[in-house]
Image: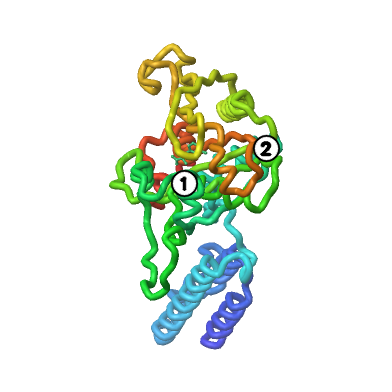
Amino acid sequence: MQEQIEKIKQGALTEIGRCQSEKELEKILYKYLGRKDGQLTAILRGVSELPEEQRQTIGSLANKARAEIDQALQKKKAGMANAGAAQTGYFDVTVPGAKPTTGHMHPLTRIRLEVQDIFKSMGFKVYEGNELTDLYYNFLSLNFPDNHPAMDSYDTFFIKEDPKKKIKPEERRMMRAHTSNMQVRIMEQNKPPLKVIVPGRCFRNEATDASHDHTFHQVEGFVVDENISIANLVYTQKALLSKIFGQEVKVRLRPGYFPFVEPGFELDCSCIICGGKGCSVCKRTGWVELIPCGMIHPKVLESAGYPKGKYTGFAFGMGWSRLAMMKYEIDDVRLLLNGDMRFLEQF
Ligand code: DAH
């Protein structure tokens, strides 16, 4: 009898050891410990009929064997659940999968690609620009006289130069205050006809608020050729805005001052929210101020080294951060760059 119990136990443990699936494990449970036909159950059931002197030893032996088999079964079952499909062939299709985290484009990037596509379809080239620039390209080449108060609204971050190096004043380095800093640089390297946009980051030494940040984005654009007129400027802006907003828009020009254009304008777009009737977005005027622009000042074309009087051109500077804010109804410019995932995950 003792041998029989030992044999049953060993048989059960070997089978448990080899077992590959939970189903097989269940079969083993029934085979050895099943209430009806379990091999060990049968022995336990017979204990009461054994002669008095055997009852105790056989009973406790059989109970011990049952406990051991039961423990081995539990252990194996837990191991299978942990080991996963690769090791055990067991795969629970109802367990929710681990979601891989995926990124997506930043709202500023989306707008940039959209704007670039529109300009490319009109024959413009896309340039990247120097974020670190100097006094000449940021101001002087653009007809800002040195120390002129017009520079005040473009206050930016200057680099601390080594005083021993004795650099010329116009070579003083700074973070660009506008993407217009690329105008003369690109003109110097290319002959007209020129159709260019420069999307890029700009910097200003600002006290930040909902509509001002020390770092923001602009798209500069310009066209230079013979006989370029204000009509070309208006047409291009109208086509661009109609494409961006997906509907025909009206535009109008008001006078604006920028040293590098003459005449200079503020280009307004008919309010797309109310269709020009007047609402809170357009402050009841029916128009939204969108694009500063103008005819390139002859002094700028001169800075580029172009022959006097040969070419004309127009230029414009779009607030790319602002465009993103309008398109996605974002009410604080600082949200765009502060890296808050709760904001970014909404796009
Ligand atoms: N660079 C100007 C700014 O940051 C915007 C601008 C105005 C660009 C008129 C232009 C222009 O090209 O013609 O305020």
Residue at x 58% of width, y 45% of height? 302
Vertical relation: 202 (above or below) 70: above
Whether residue 319 is visible: yes
In depth, the one of 239 and 317 nearer the eye is: 317
Q: Quadrant of residue 57?
A: bottom left
User: Label 1 belongs to which residue?
Assistant: 178
Callout 1: few (<14), some (14-19), or many (20+) C-alpha neighbours within 10 Å? many
Badge nearest the viewer, 1 or 2: 2
Q: Amino acid at mark 1?
A: His
Up/down of 313 relative to 208, above or below: above
Residue 344 makes an appearance in the image: no
Q: Upstream in the sequence, badge 1 or badge 2?
A: 1
Image point (41%, 70%), residue name: 166
Quarter where residue 55 is shown:
bottom left
Residue 271 is situated, as x and y percent measured from the top left of the image, at 47, 20
Task: Left or right? Give the position of 225 relative to 304.
Answer: right
Label number found at residue 310: 2
Image coordinates of residue 20 in percent, x first then y, are 63, 70
| Label 2 CA crowd tier, 10 Å (few <14, some 14–19, many 20+) | few
